[in-house]
Image (tube, rainbow, N blue to C red):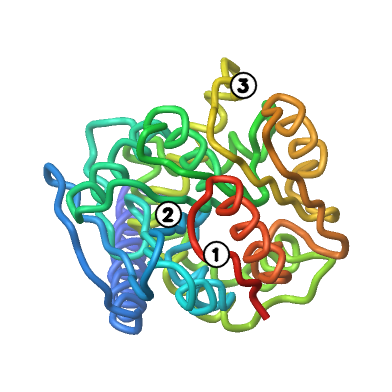
């Protein structure tokens, strides 16, 4: 290949990369335009977006890695819980419409402090919190770090004791500077869209895929900015797996633990049983025929656990959900 041919090839690759990046960013803007618009709160340069409804004891909902606050609207948990509680479903930093400023590691502890500060700014002094998957880690950190504010916790499909896995290392690659930027803007969005059906089958199995969630989340999860957050949280999970130091016995508030018996991402049942053994005042529910998205497949199980934890915390009206 001549020098001129190499130059032309490089120019073609650069033009193709730039074109893909522009196309993916256009789709990202469209995905945001189609979202439910809630409220924003600014804390030291981090803008958090959240949906709010209902009255009564405040209940915070925290989604997992790759999702957004709509995870709880599409499951029906948001509306059904709002009949009994004051529900606030947050876009965690870097997801949905919430920003994730660079220059600091957005660990579970950092996010716990941020969200606690957000609800304090809203005038909320005491609340319950539900966290799914990565959001479960944030919820437990909130209970540990802010015990005077947290009345109770429900963790759903939490990876409480992560171990080193190749999948985590691969998922963390887009967080690498320079090459990660190219991957996030030009390559990965298309790959995410092409493999979306496969990814949905994996996280929902053995339950059927919830079409409202799959449809709503596809455009958001393939945005370059959200892919950066996804890969960063995969890196943080990998780091915690390589340097394990998680202990939960010091959590003093009531904790409800839920896992899908058929979770294919990791052994969620074993994780739940281990967490229950460490937190003596916890409740456990292993949901049969459910996978990692157990809250989508069996929302009634999460609503029932919320009421049980609220009862232990002596808050709220204990009337059962339908």
* Residues at marks 2 and 3, CA–CA distance in whole angstroms: 33 Å
Residue shown at 59%/75% (left/top)? 75
* Residues at marks 3 and 1, CA–CA distance in whole angstroms: 38 Å
Q: How many marks?
A: 3
Residue shown at 42%/56% (left/top)? 60
Instruction: Give the percent coordinates (x, y) of residue 265.
Output: 73, 48
Q: In the picture shown, does residue 187 fall above or below 195?
A: above
Between residue 73 and residue 201, name the one nearer to us: 73
Residue shown at 52%/24% (left/top)? 239
Can residue 272 be seen at all in this image of the molecule? yes
Q: Are marks 1 and 2 in contact (CB under 8 Å)?
A: yes
Instruction: Give the percent coordinates (x, y) of residue 269.
Output: 81, 43
Nearer-N-terminus badge (1/2): 1
* Disc nearest the viewer among 3 and 1: 3
| In-image side of 164 versus 72 (left or right) | right
Between residue 187 and residue 96, name the one nearer to us: 96
Nearer-N-terminus badge (2/3): 2
* Residues at marks 1 and 2, CA–CA distance in whole angstroms: 10 Å
- Local packing at callout 2 (Cα closer than 10 Å; few below 14, some 14-19, many 20+) is many
Q: In the picture shown, does residue 73 fall above or below 290?
A: below
Residue under label 3, please give it. 249
- Local packing at callout 3 (Cα closer than 10 Å; few below 14, some 14-19, many 20+) is some
Instruction: Give the percent coordinates (x, y) of residue 255.
Output: 61, 41
Mark drawn on residue 131: none
Residue under label 1, please give it. 192
Between residue 154 and residue 35, name the one nearer to us: 154
| In-image side of 316 versus 117 (left or right) | right
User: Tag 2, which secondary structure?
Assistant: helix
Residue shown at 34%/63% (left/top)? 12
Residue under label 2, please give it. 227
């Amino acid at each position: 290949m001549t020098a001129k041919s190499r130059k032309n090839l490089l120019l073609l690759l650069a033009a193709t990369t730039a074109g893909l990046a522009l196309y993916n960013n256009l789709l990202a803007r469209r995905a945001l335009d189609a979202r439910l618009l809630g409220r924003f709160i600014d804390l030291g340069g981090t803008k958090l977006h959240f949906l709010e409804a209902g009255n009564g004891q405040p209940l915070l909902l925290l989604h997992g890695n790759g999702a957004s606050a709509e995870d709880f609207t599409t499951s029906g948990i948001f509306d059904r819980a709002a009949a009994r509680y004051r529900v606030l479903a947050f876009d965690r930093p870097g997801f949905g419409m919430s920003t994730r400023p660079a220059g600091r590691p957005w660990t579970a502890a950092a996010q716990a402090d941020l969200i606690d500060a957000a609800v304090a700014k809203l005038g909320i002094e005491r609340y319950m919190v539900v966290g799914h998957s990565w959001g479960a880690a944030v919820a437990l950190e909130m209970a540990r770090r802010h015990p005077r504010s947290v009345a109770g916790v429900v963790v759903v499909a939490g990876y409480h004791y992560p171990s080193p896995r190749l999948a985590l290392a691969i998922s963390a690659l887009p967080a690498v500077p320079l090459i990660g930027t190219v991957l996030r803007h030009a390559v990965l969005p298309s790959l995410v869209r092409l493999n979306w059906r496969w990814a949905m089958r994996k996280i929902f199995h053995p339950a059927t895929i919830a079409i409202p969630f799959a449809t709503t989340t596809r455009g958001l999860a393939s945005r370059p900015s959200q892919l950066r957050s996804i890969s960063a949280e995969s890196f943080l999970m990998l780091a915690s797996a390589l340097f394990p130091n998680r202990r939960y016995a010091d959590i003093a508030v009531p904790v409800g633990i839920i896992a899908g018996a058929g979770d294919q991402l990791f052994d969620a049942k074993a994780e739940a049983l281990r967490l229950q053994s460490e937190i003596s005042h916890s409740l456990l529910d292993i949901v049969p025929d459910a996978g990692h998205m157990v809250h989508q497949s069996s929302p009634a199980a999460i609503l029932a656990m919320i009421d049980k934890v609220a009862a232990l915390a002596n808050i709220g009206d204990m009337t059962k959900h339908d």
